[in-house]
Amino acid sequence: QVQLVESGGGLVQAGGSLRLSCAASGRSFSRSTMGWFRQAPGKEREFVAAINWSGAYTYVADSVKGRFTISRDNAKNTGYMQMNSLKPEDTAVYYCAAARGIAVTSRTPNVYEYWGQGTQVTVSS
C-alpha cells in the first residue's frame, strides 16, 4: 500500500512559480512510477508529468514542457513538481499518483493505482 499526500498549492500571479510536493508512505513508492495529473472544473483529469522509480526517466506533457520539472527523492519518499512561468490555464487541482510496473509515458489515469487527495493551484491573470 502507498499513501500519498500533496502540498504546496496556492494562489499565485501569472508568471509566478510554485513547488508541489508529494509525500509518500509505504516501501513500494521507491519502486513505483510517480505521476502528476491535474483537473480543472468541468474538465477531465489531465496528465502533466511522470518520473520512473529511479528518477532517470521523465516525461512531460507538451502543455507544460519547459515550464514544469518533475523530480523525486526516494530517500525522503517524496516527489516534487517545480512549476515556473505559471499561466491562468494551469489553474486546477493537482494530484500525484503512483504505480509499479508502468512506463513514464503512460498518460491514462486509470493505470495508476494510488492517488493523493489533491492540492489546489490557482493562477491569477
Image (cartoon, grey):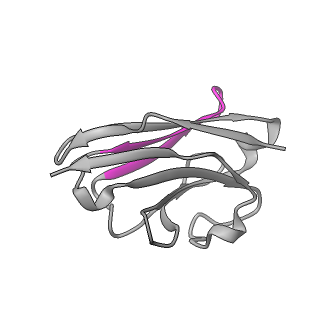
Specify the principal SS of the magenta part. Answer: strand
Q: Does the magenta stretch include residue 86?
A: no
Residue 104 placement: quadrant: bottom right
Q: Where is residue 106 in the image (x, y as percent from the top left)?
A: 61, 71
Q: Which residue is drawn at 64% across and 53% down?
A: 97
Q: Which residue is drawn at 30% across and 39% down?
A: 11
Residue 6 placement: quadrant: top right
Q: Position of residue 47 (x, y in %)?
A: 50, 66
User: Which residues, given as a range, are shown in magenta?
Assistant: 68-83
Q: Position of residue 95 (x, y in %)?
A: 55, 51
- Left or right, residue 9 beside residue 83: right
Q: Position of residue 38 (x, y in %)?
A: 47, 59
Q: Can residue 15 be seen in this view?
A: yes
Q: Which residue is drawn at 80% across and 36% down?
A: 26
Quarter of the figure with the N terminus: top right
Residue 40 placement: quadrant: bottom left
Q: Can residue 17 be seen in this view?
A: no
- Left or right, residue 42 beside residue 29: left
Above or below, comparing residue 37 to residue 6 in the picture: below
Q: Which residue lies furthest to the top in this view?
A: 76
Above or below, comparing residue 22 to residue 122 in the picture: above
Q: Which of 19 and 122 is in front in this view?
A: 122
Q: Residue at x 33, y 55 (%)?
A: 91
- Left or right, residue 95 beside residue 74: left
Q: Which of 78 and 95 is in front in this view?
A: 95
Q: Is residue 73 magenta?
A: yes
Q: Which residue lies furthest to the right in this view?
A: 1
